[in-house]
Amino acid sequence: MTIYQNLLGEDFKRLHPQLQSRYALPKNKPFCASGKMTLVQSGTGWLYPFLKLATKRKFLFPESGNNIPFTIRNTSRSLSHELDEVYWERTFYFDHVTRYFNAFMTIDSERKVVKDYLGEPSLFYSDLHFNVTPEGHLNIRSGVQRLVIGKLEISIPSFLRGVVEVEEGYDDTREVFTIRVHIQNRIVGRLMAYEGEFKETSI
């Protein structure tokens, strides 16, 4: 049973069957998929130095575009006898550069949240709240966040946080997974957004 099944409990069964299969994630048997992001938007121009720096940690990036080829790989693995982790590898293939948006996820069973460490090595931490919509989609929203500097984690005030909204679904007609991600800050506006679709591929 993966961290997502543990977190959602009975609600996991309300996900679209294809999403249940996607998030079942047997240990060391990755879910791999490819597709296109119909729209990728970075933050405002003055954020460019920060976004460019973030690319060195496989975090945010400054590029934008349409119909950007995309791959995703999720691997469930055991960190210890009692702790499982899902390693996220998201890759965007722009015309002249390849960018990454990687993460490491575990769960906090007591607080009922996913613990999301973004970047490789991790630069940013966020609580994630997972919910299933009436349509069987997976909805994800952010909560408490911290800046990660080595082993030090510094709490980020609410007005400086990146507000994350994600919705993932499945289109039965076209037989594709759909994804919409929006990350914004209440002061500077959009930090990154992308939306598109992808299909599972063989490993």
Image: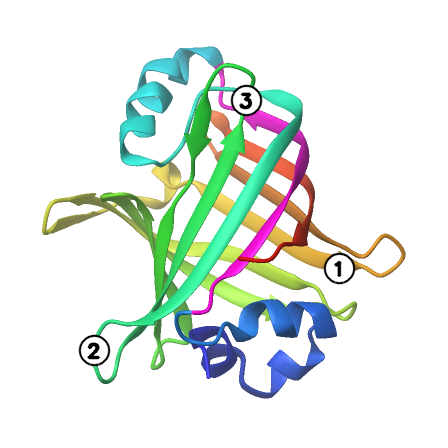
Q: CA distance from mark 2 to mark 3?
A: 37 Å
Marks 1 and 2, the one that precedes in the sequence: 2
What's the residue type where badge 1 is placed? Tyr
Q: Which is nearer the eye, 103 or 136?
A: 103
List the single residue furthest toward the top: 45
Separation of marks 1 and 2 at Cα, in angstroms: 33 Å
Question: Quick check: marks 2 and 3 in contact, CB under 8 Å?
Answer: no
Few, some or many residues within 10 Å of mark 3 (<14, 14–19, 20+)? some
Could you tell me which residue is drawn at 81 percent across and 57 percent down? 175
Q: Amino acid at mark 3?
A: Phe
Q: Residue at x 71, y 58 (%)?
A: 169
- Between discs 3 and 1, the one toward the N terminus: 3
Residue 22 at x, y percent in the picture = 60, 67
Say if the magenta span includes residue 25. no
User: What main secondary structure does the magenta stretch of the protein show?
Assistant: strand
Q: Is residue 194 above or below residue 108?
A: above
Q: Which residues are magenta?
A: 29-44
The residue that mark 3 highlights is: 94
Tally of numbered tags: 3
Residue drawn at x 56%, y 17% as measured from the top left? 95
The crowd level at tag 2 (other Cα within 10 Å; few <14, some 14-19, many 20+) is few
Say which quarter of the image contains residue 76.
bottom left
Residue type, mark 2 in image: Ser
Q: Which mark is residue 170?
A: 1
